Image: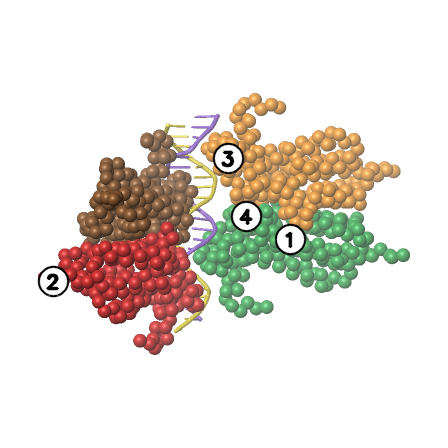
Chain colours: A brown, B red, C orange, D green, E purple, F yellow
Amino acid sequence: MKLTKISEIRRKELRQAAFEVLQLEGMAGATLEKVAQHAGASKGIVLHYFRNKQELFEHAMREANVALREAVVARLMLAKTPYERLEAVIEGNFEERFFRPSICHAWLSLCAEVPREPQLGRIQRVIHARMRSNLMSALKHLLPENECQVVALSITALIDGLWLRLGLQSEGLTREMALAEMRDYLQHRVPKMAPSNP
Amino acid sequence: MKLTKISEIRRKELRQAAFEVLQLEGMAGATLEKVAQHAGASKGIVLHYFRNKQELFEHAMREANVALREAVVARLMLAKTPYERLEAVIEGNFEERFFRPSICHAWLSLCAEVPREPQLGRIQRVIHARMRSNLMSALKHLLPENECQVVALSITALIDGLWLRLGLQSEGLTREMALAEMRDYLQHRVPKMAPSNP
Amino acid sequence: MKLTKISEIRRKELRQAAFEVLQLEGMAGATLEKVAQHAGASKGIVLHYFRNKQELFEHAMREANVALREAVVARLMLAKTPYERLEAVIEGNFEERFFRPSICHAWLSLCAEVPREPQLGRIQRVIHARMRSNLMSALKHLLPENECQVVALSITALIDGLWLRLGLQSEGLTREMALAEMRDYLQHRVPKMAPSNP
Amino acid sequence: MKLTKISEIRRKELRQAAFEVLQLEGMAGATLEKVAQHAGASKGIVLHYFRNKQELFEHAMREANVALREAVVARLMLAKTPYERLEAVIEGNFEERFFRPSICHAWLSLCAEVPREPQLGRIQRVIHARMRSNLMSALKHLLPENECQVVALSITALIDGLWLRLGLQSEGLTREMALAEMRDYLQHRVPKMAPSNP
DNA sequence: GATGAATGAGGGTTCATTCAT
DNA sequence: TATGAATGAACCCTCATTCAT
């Protein structure tokens, strides 16, 4: 999917610049000036492509989400068993290039705006719904129906909680520790094979 | 611990007002003017009692933390067994008066500032350390030593993840659902009794 | 007078679009972008045909003036007596398609710029001079020479005053009321026939 | 009526500064910076006393109107006969300190904003209503009832038309010429004495 | 001829902070 | 102690204008 028009190229550049500035400065510190500078452009051009700051960061959030989604999808396509699909979702969410303090921090900044920016809220909800749907489609082969919901929510909450901790950089959390946490949970809560139906 | 001096009363009022405004408006929208208004005071007085905005919200965070801590401590004192202490920590963190969207949102706003405000980071780290220590002191009676760390981190991550979700208000999460999640985790991961030492 | 060259057609479109936007948005709100949009063209093209914004609105004013002049001229050509010529001038100025709130408002916006835009001032002066000349050439047959100036100025002031009121849309002024005003004035101030020369 | 609080003094200064800048620069050119400068203050203070630019100029318009009203009222109080009251209204509107090109220009700028600023429109309507009421209360003693409305509107239209012309500074209109116009109108349209009731 | 990318200046507005009273 | 006047910096955003294609 090539971006033919220059406008789409610029828009992508600016979305990415916005997300990068977000990592460094948080939402309050992420001024249009800094985003423009980061993209090597003038301040005016930013609002030439995005109606306002809010729209810019909305697209930045969407872009970051797409990257995350693609990482998960790529792994899902290689997964053969339901359990492997669970692992795919989890490992996609902890890929090295995403699971970094600065990126977690950027997400945190976006999430903090959700209650006052309905657009961001909508994106957030889409992200959660997708994660849940991915988990459910795997879990329903591994657990009795009435447990799937609870376990799915636990997994997403664990992931979010670990991301939050990385964003806060407390306790020197590393990617390996996070993955160990997830594995420990799966091991104790989700059987590797579907229950034999008598 | 009575607040004898009038100045201490004012400070407390302002700390609380700050936290309330944070719930309503997030960090960016929490101006000194609004905090003053919320406390029924003039704008000037806020910086009479706190050196600057940052210091005010630092104290607001500390104050909110104290309330949470006291809720946990009160429950801990009633707990008799290690497992009950685990439950005390968890239930304290999900007490009805704290586990509300607006309050989760306020915490989220504060957390989003942590990477750029060392003082907030310090408070955050204290909170995490206390939670972990509380959990560890209970877990070490219930689990082999090498599993305690992992489980403690899982519990805190779960709690944080559920708070985050409440702050984002996605999926209509309720207090009951959150507690059910926690119980499900404990049930599958932590035995109610200490392992018999052979 | 056909507009042969395509460029002249475009210029005319843009002049008219400019005047229409002026009616809707006033001078401050009349951006080049909106004018272009209104003409179904791109923003760049506007300054391709007009050196700058000022020149565009100068031409818009001229164009609107031409339309008004033609309305008056058409009526003047049908008038046979001096008094009928007076009426022609007046009725031309209150023709239904011109005497509308939005158009009066556009003129008002242009007039407000006159003190700072010499070009607009020049056009304004031409308009006034023509009106005065039209009135004088009729009045000199109906009134003693020394009264003509005063009456001509009264008539133009009345017309302008009524336009202004329509632009402000206060008092629900209608075309009929305005014409009644003018007729009342003429009736009491200007005899229908030339004074008999003894 | 002394302005006790410093805030009221500042507000008055700023209102007047705003009106003065309006005279020099028109509405578009009347930036808050210039108003502040003109009042010898900082830009920030302007919005400390007025919520926004619109509110500032609304108050400026009101202030200018009050001055005009007081001039008329002062003359009205000295008038003994209905005809003198007519003259009072007219002469008040052409007082030397008001009937100046720059002031007419300022009013013109305000009027041009009326269609897009309901607040200004409201003030404008009050001004018109007062003028009309003043005229009517005098005219009803001098003219048959059915003519009063028309004459009152003619007078206000004449006044406005003459002000407009002064604002545009076309034809070298002077105060004396304007007054001569008004006198000429009255002379031919309004009898100096009440009609004798048979 | 026509488009729209790009710039940069400037405006309104918000706010933390300082100060005089 | 308490108020609110005053400042100045910074931000978002708008727009006329220029240019490359």
Q: Which mark is residue D125?
A: 1
Alpha carbon of mark 4 to alpha carbon of mark 2: how far?
Answer: 91 Å
Determine whether E10 is above or below B114 in the image.
above
Depth check: give the residue in front, A33 or D184.
Answer: A33
Depth check: give the residue in front, A193 or B141.
Answer: A193
Q: For mark 4, what is the residue?
A: D26
Q: Amino acid at mark 3?
A: Gln
- Quadrant in the rendering for residue B114: bottom left
Farthest-out residue, right: D198
Q: Amino acid at mark 1?
A: Arg
Can you give x and y, in whole percent of width and height, for residue A194 in the image?
A: 24, 43
Q: Chain of mark 4?
A: D
User: Badge 1, how many Cα within 10 Å: few under 14, some, many 20+?
Assistant: some
* Same chain for the residues under marks 4 and 2 in the image: no
Q: Which mark is residue C37?
A: 3
Q: For mark 2, what is the residue?
A: B197
SS of the residue under disc 2: loop
Can residue A14 be seen here? Answer: yes
Can you give x and y, in whole percent of width and height, for residue C98 in the image?
A: 66, 37
Q: Which image quarter holds the C terminus of chain C?
A: top right
Q: Chain of mark 1?
A: D
Q: Chain of mark 2?
A: B
Position of residue D160 in the picture relative to residue A77 (left or right)? right
- Is label 4 or label 1 in front? 1
Q: Amino acid at mark 4?
A: Gly
Q: Amino acid at mark 2?
A: Asn
Whether label 4 touches label 3, CB < 8 Å? no
